[in-house]
Every structure is written in structure tokens, then in C-alpha cells.
Image: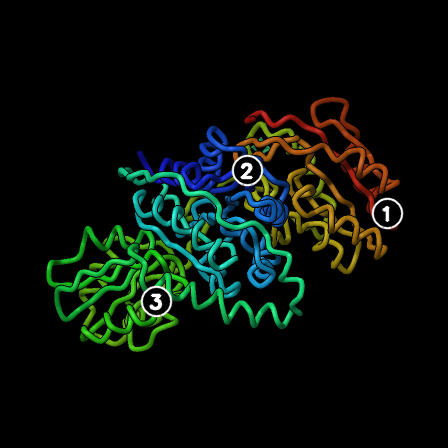
Amino acid sequence: MNGIDAVVFALVDSNVKSVTGVPGFPITELMDAAMEKLRSEWSINEKVALDMALGSSVCGQRSAVITKHVGMNVLADPLVSSTTHTIGAGVVIIAGDDPGIEKSQNEQDSRFYGLVAEVPVFDPDCPQTAYQCIIDAFVLSEKTSAPVIIRITDRMLKTIGDFTRVNASVPTAGFDKKMWHLTMKGKHQRFHKTSYPLMCGYSENSRLNTIARRGKVGIISSGFSSHIVDFVIPDDISHLSLAAVNPLPMELVKSFVQGHERILVVEETEPVIEKQLSGVLGKLTGHMPYGKTEAEDIKNALGNIGRDTVSRDIVPQTIQKRGARPICDNCPYLPLYNAVKETGVPVAGDVGCVILASSPPLSLIDAAYSLGGAISTASGFDRKGIALIGDFGLAHSGINGLVNAVHNRHNVVVVVLQNEVSAMTGGQPVPDLTGLVSSYIRDTQVIDMDGGLPDLKKLLAEKLEKKGISVILARGKCPVY
Ligand code: SF4
């Protein structure tokens, strides 16, 4: 058994009726495993996934959302509102972080969303804790009438370990329409009067936060970092291992800190716990690096435990050092990429396979900020440029940018790489939006990358000459999926 099994069985044992999610590292495999045991579906985007989970909750059915960390940005809107709006049956969001950025566009820390939305966050270190966190999370979600976040990482999911299954619990709550009697201000007041104290009470007393008192130096850790700490610390160093990290159990933490002369905080990815404390050592003092925790980092930090600050020479990683991740040699879109490069106009990219065209030898893309963002970014250019977007990016949120571009009369050539799969995340199917796009945009042209291609350079030049929005739907078959 591993962390993936623990999460899936915890969802099953919690009587979850619906799982929604969006593919991406490190949660694709987890979602695939959930799909074998639970009613699950890949959603078009993370906001849709959470909106749907909330709908299930209203009808008294427990639901879970599985997303990578960047998806937390997309679902943040209903997440923050649902906390004060209140929910019905439990909703748990499993957020897969990527410390070390193996396969992501950034290295953000999902635990911060607990502080933003004022919802409980669990950060399990191993399969057993992950299982128990999810079991507790559904009960807590119903008690506090708010979603709960479980932060996981690839290493936690892949860790081998047993877990003890418990008898299924059942939802205790349906949605109570009485909350509509409150104003928006009243809802937030109700939250702070009733829900937030319950969250704090849970954190302070959770059996999932464990303490080993052993000496004058103590470590506070959470998540997979706790797992590593347990392996490396000497016998004379104390350890407070936190799984319930938001709200931070302040009384527990204070009592631990007071009993020690030096405290080191070990956590992935950002100093979320450390920033809430004073007089401790960690990332902010240079003792620990940002991002992924390694055993060597903890040993080095303990070696410097007598110092108040440690100078850390950060050398930003280059593509040359890491190694390039170029477009596949047999990608059907290579002729199109080459033609786009020759236009000399600004090019906004997306974070699907298109992002691979940003590196040499193509070096094609000027900027690529978010999944689905290419059309809106190109709408901000000072001249007619090109938006290169995958069909998953278009369905995810790019379609909003397209509607906005037409509505506000922008000038953009939109090139959609329409291979009907999300190739970057494992080949999940993508809806065909040809009918929708061609009925909305008069200047829509379908081309086939696998045969009968027009002169691409001439085609792009013609579209760039025209005013308004031009769409090229470039159909091609990805040889990988
Ligand atoms: S995975 Fe498919 S679509 Fe992506 S670069 Fe490779 S061949 Fe092209």
C-alpha cells in the first residue's frame, strides 16, 4: 500500500459520492486510482470541479476535488465564498503540491489557501496520516460547514506504508437554507462566531499532531518533511509533527516552543508555519532552503542551530543545467511552430505542450502565464499578435478570453492546437469546440496538420493583415497518445 491507496480508501470509507478533478502532476495517478472505485470525472477546470462538488454537498452527498496546486488559484473564488456561505455534506479538496517543481509552472504552497479562505488544512506525512486526515476532514467539514484542504505531495503519495481502515462514517448534514436570512456581513460574523472556533478547537486537540520531547532543541514540521525529520534527527532533539496545520494550533505550538532553547521549522514549500511564529529558525533565517526538503538540509540546519542567521547562496537553476525539454521530434505541430516563428509578431503561449516551444531551438513564445491565458495575453499586445493555445487550454478557461477578445474588438490570431487530448498531463480527452468557435467567430479556418496543409506562412500573414479575431483550428494527432 502507498499514499495513493490511503487517499482513495479514505474517500471510499468516508462515503464520498462524487470526485471531480483536473489532471496534472502530482495528482493524475491519484485521480486515475479514484476513478476505479468512485464516481469520478475530469472537469474542464478547477472552479467547475469545486462548483460541482458544492452542488453535491448541497444535496447531502460528500464530494472531493482533486487538483494540482496551480488549480487552487482557479478554484479560489468558490472556495473563499463557500466558507461563509456554508455547505451541506462534507467537501474535501486534495491539493497536490510540487516542491522542487518537477512538472509545474510554479512552486506555490497550497497551505496558504487555508489562511486566505479560513478553512482547515491538513498536511499528512505518510499513508496512515493521510488516511486519518481525510476521515477527520469530512467530519470537520460538516461540523464547520466549510470545505477542508488536504495538501499532498508526490513523495507522500508514493511512500509505502500500511494504514488501518475504519468503519464508514456517513454525512451528518444537508444544506440549511436558513443561512439566506443573514446578510453577507452576517454570514462572515456567523463564521467567526461558530465555525472558526470549532476549527481552532480541532487543531489544538487533534490526535494527528504528535509531540516527542527530548532535549533543548526542537523541530516543528509538517507534511512529508515530518517523515524525513523522523529519519534524521538525533535522539536528543524534540519533534512536534503537525498534520492539522491550519488554523495553526497556537497553544500547542507555544507550549512546545517555550520548553526549548532553539526551534527549527522544517516545511515544504514556503515558510507558512514559520511566518506565524517569532523567534524560530527556518527558511526566513536561511537555515532551510525554500522548496523541497532533503535530509541533508535538516542536518545542515541542525549544524547551524546556534546561529541566528545563515547566509544562503541561491543559484537560480538554468535550462542548460537542468536539461532542455523540447517539443517531440515527431510532433505534427512543428511546421506550424516554425511558420509562427517567422512572422516576427509577439506570441502569447499557454502552459500545455505549447510551453515546450519556449526553449531553444524554437524559442518561439514571448510569454506564457497560465493555462488558458494565451488569448487574453495576446489581447493586451500593442499590435495584432498570435495566441498559441492547446484545445485543453481553450476549454479550461481560454474560451473566456476568446469571448472577451471578440466583445472588446481586439486583434488577435488565435491558433488552437486541436489534438483532442491533454498531452501534457497524460492524454486525457478534450471536448471538440469546433462548432462553438466557428459559430461565434466568422473568421475561423480549420487546417489538418496530418495532410493537405496550406502554405502556413502565407496563411498567418493573411490573418495578421485582417482586423479583429481570426481563429485557426489546427487539427493534428499526437503520436504519444
Ligand atoms: S506530446 Fe504530442 S502534442 Fe505534445 S509535443 Fe509531443 S507530439 Fe506534440
Is 189 left or right of 249, judged from the image as shown? Answer: right
The secondary element bearing badge 1 is classed as helix
Q: Residue at x 84, y 54 (%)?
A: 407
The residue indicated by pointer 1 is: 465
Whether residue 268 is visible here, answered yes or no, is yes
Viewer-side residue, 71 vs 478: 71
**Of 169 and 236, which appears nearest the observer?**
169
Location of the C terminus (image quadrant): top right
Tell me: residue 158, above or below residue 252. Answer: above
Whichever of callouts 2 and 1 sits on the residue coming sooner in the sequence is 2
Amino acid on which the number 3 mark rests in the picture: Pro
Q: Is mark 3 within 8 Å of ligand 1?
A: no
For this orientation, the residue located farthest to the top is 451
The percent position of residue 389, horizontal first and vertical second, equals: 67, 43
Residue type at mark 2? Met
User: What residue does disc 3 label?
Assistant: 249
Where does label 2 land, which residue? 424
Mark 3 or 2: in front is 3
Q: CA distance from mark 1 to mark 3?
A: 61 Å
